[in-house]
Image: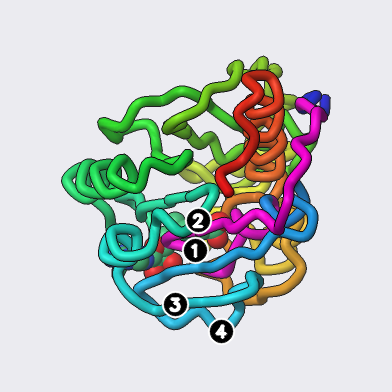
Amino acid sequence: MTQPTPIRRVALTRPLRVLDTYSCIGGATAGYRLAFPGCHITGVDIQDQPDYCGDAFHQGDAIEFIRAYGHEFDFIHASPPCQGEGAPTKGTNARRNAEMAALETTGRPYVMENVAGSEVRKDIRLCGEQFGLAVLMHRYFELGGWTTVQPAHPRHRGRVRGWRHGVYHDGPYVAAYGNGGGKATVEEIRTAKGIDWSTDHLRLREALPPAYTEWIGRAFLGSRAATGLGVAA
Ligand SMILES: C[S@@+](CC[C@H](N)C(=O)[O-])C[C@H]1O[C@@H](n2cnc3c(N)ncnc32)[C@H](O)[C@@H]1O
């Protein structure tokens, strides 16, 4: 079942400026582009990201960039690396806390993604099944400076397919993490997440399905319209 999203619009006097930190290839960026037509999106990542799909890219530390330039943006997204995936970019709760402090100093609305084991507040939980995707990828989001309502979490249609403890399980979802054991191929992840601009297996695994941030972006605009706050000029 596809999740309904808020559809109220805010009249903007200029393109919305979005900052996507820890951008990787820009799974989050692609969703915001759908939610905020005509916006300008800047990605920041510590690694070079030749497949990044936004308008501008800065290679460097996300926290340093937010401290220096975060206040110049209307909306900030942060996806600090999680513990289990992508060894060179492993994350910690300490980094998440430092990230949150930097975001707070900007005074701008933000979203910080996190996983089940992190200390960050879990205002929203999204799951691929909410968008009819063939990947579960539960992710939590702390919302800074705005709020919205947690969408319903639909019942999963079945299992994640692949090998576990010597037994092959079939199911409607692909395992978009790790390698081997029936884990998803590049093509399977691209199809499951709705990402068609990269063939990098590790980065495809790390990327958010754009449907998640499209939903978040629309929810943000809905919250601004509801409170009459509009978007910072
Ligand atoms: C989980 S991925 C983000 C996925 C992204 N949100 C998407 O939807 O495509 C985490 C990213 O954080 C980057 N990273 C790790 N440490 C960083 C730092 N100190 N500053 C900026 N980026 C960093 C990694 O290179 C990696 O691309």
The quarter of the displayed image where residue 150 is located: top right
Which numbered marker is on residue 23? 1
Percent x, y for residue 124?
52, 25
Disc with the residue nearer the chain's start (1 vs 4): 1
Marks 3/4: CA distance?
A: 11 Å
Respond yes or no on whether mark 1 lies under 8 Å from ligand 1: yes
Instruction: Count neighbours of disc 4 (C-alpha within 10 A) and say few if under 14, some if 14 to 19, many if 20 or more.
Output: few
Q: Secondary structure at mark 3?
A: strand
Badge 3 amino acid: His
Task: Please name the residue shown 64% across and 44% down the image.
Answer: 213
Badge 1 amino acid: Ser
* Label 1 with label 4: CB-CB less than 8 Å: no
- Eye-nearest disc, 3 or 1: 3
Q: Is residue 16 above or below residue 137?
A: below
Label 3, on which residue? Answer: 58
Disc with the residue nearer the chain's start (3 vs 4): 4
Which numbered marker is on residue 73? 2
Which numbered marker is on residue 136? none
The quarter of the displayed image where residue 16 is located: bottom right
Looking at the rendering, the stretch of residues picked out in magenta corresponds to: 6-31
Which numbered marker is on residue 50? 4
Badge 2 amino acid: Phe
Percent x, y for residue 202?
50, 68
Which color scheme did the rendering employ for the protein?
Answer: rainbow
* Label 3 with label 2: CB-CB less than 8 Å: no
Disc with the residue nearer the chain's start (3 vs 1): 1
- Eye-nearest disc, 3 or 4: 3
Location of the N terminus (image quadrant): top right
